[in-house]
Amino acid sequence: MPTVRFRTAWCVVAGIATVTTSLTAACSGARAVESTTAGRGGDTAVVSRKDVVQTVRLHGLVEAVESVPIVTPRLAGAQGGGLVITRLAANGARVKQGDVLVEFDRQEQLNAALEKRAEWQDLEAQIEKKKAEQAQQSAEDETELKLAEHAADMARLETLKNEMLPDIEAEQNTNAFEAAQARYEQLQESLPLKRQAAQAELRMLEVQRDRAREEFRYAEDNAERMIVRSSMAGLVVLKSNWRGGGVTDIEEGDEMWPGRPVMQVVNPVRMRVRVRVNQADLTGLRVGQAAQIALDAFPDHTYTGRLERLAPVGLTSTLNRDIRSYVAVFALDRPDARVAPDLSAAVDVEVARWRQALSVPRSAIRRQGSETYEVAMEDGNGSIDWRPVKLTALTDMEGVIADGVTAGDTVVTSSTEGASP
């Protein structure tokens, strides 16, 4: 029995050892296959020394430094309503000072000016006629007053004979004097009232004349306002209009409401790009920094510029009150005919530069811990050797290495998604 138990225990121990050996061999084989596969699947790059540039890309719209907005005029004395465009300068046309930019339908205002001018002239004639009539009437009234005064004086002289005349004749003389005196006093009192009435009648005609004259001037001025001329030499940039379910450029025949923008006349020599900068990108920006500017409409052509102005106060985001953006303005050095207002533009600003630094693709760098970085090196056997390095900076595409690799080393670029900053 003891022999049987010993033999059984030995068999169990041998079986466990065999299983353990098999599992260990299987795991070692799996690790060897994983390392080899990773090494064979990686793209490689060579560490080199070069100037590494860190840039910030910003997006905004082109605008003119000098521009004159052209809006639909507000007509004096008008009751509202739209104005129809009858003549319009072409989009992109170059104009000189005094050139006609837009003309609206003036027929109604011209007809009103003709009617009010005729009414004004007619009232002027009526006033002259009324003045002549009133002058004649005033002379007649003065003559009548003099006659009444003379009649009263004569009647008063007749009353001096009453002591020598019978009572009936004396009483007749007294009555005649009183009647003549009453008529004279009545004319004295009524004459100023008649003159006031004449002045009021004349003033009424003058008010009508003045109103007709002002309406004529309003109509004439409105007709002149409906021809808009350029106050500066520059480039025409038409505004957009909603028509037929879509947005199109303003055209002849469109009806525009007073105060609505029609176009801009811009100075094409001085253009700029207005962008919004996230607060995370603000620290590297300084006024005067150089920039490369590309228009989305012409991606193959770039322009040079500089940061001209940076807002000191940020704008709060509508989505998150903790996030702010800052307005920055970049001036273009030499804009050409392709640069027009309202075009979208991309601005690349150089915020840092490392001259003749060791450069490694960012995809070959990984982060280990809080401050440790490693580079994927090819060891020559098809596997990856992660080598600790001292990192100076990380850009969007590259890492600047201070120590740990040398120029000419080969790194594996597709072994990681790139280090986080």
Image (tube, helix red, strand yellow):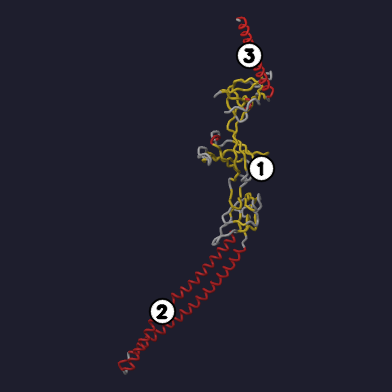
User: Under tag 2, what secondary structure?
Assistant: helix
Q: Nearer the viewer, residue 266 or 373?
A: 373
For residue 190, the mark is: 2
Residue lying furthest front in this view?
1
Tag 3 or tag 1, which sits nearer the N-term? 3
Q: Quadrant of the C terminus?
A: top right
User: Under tag 1, what secondary structure?
Assistant: loop
Q: Position of residue 278 (x, y in %)?
A: 55, 37
Tag 2 or tag 1, which sits nearer the N-term? 2
Q: Where is residue 399 in the image (x, y as percent from the top left)?
A: 61, 26
Against 195, residue 34 (above or below) is above
Residue 188, picture quadrant: bottom left
Residue drawn at (52%, 74%), measured in percent from left and top? 128
Q: Are marks 2 and 3 in contact (CB under 8 Å)?
A: no
Dot 3: few (<14), some (14–19), or many (≥20) neighbours within 10 Å?
few
Residue wearing tag 3: 20
Q: In which quarter of the image is the N terminus?
A: top right
Q: Position of residue 113 (x, y in %)?
A: 58, 66
Which amino acid type corresponds to the residue marked 1 in the rendered image? Ala
Q: Which of 317 and 47 is in front in this view?
A: 317
Residue drawn at (31%, 95%), measured in percent from left and top? 166
Q: Nearer the viewer, mark 2 or mark 3?
A: 3
Which amino acid type corresponds to the residue marked 2 in the rendered image? Ser
Which amino acid type corresponds to the residue marked 3 in the rendered image? Thr
User: Under tag 3, what secondary structure?
Assistant: helix
Against 215, residue 343 (above or below) is above
Residue 343, picture quadrant: top right
For residue 45, the mark is: none
Left or right of 263: which side holds 134? Answer: left
Residue lying furthest bottom in this view?
166
For residue 297, the mark is: 1
How far separated are the C-alphas under marks 2 and 3?
143 Å
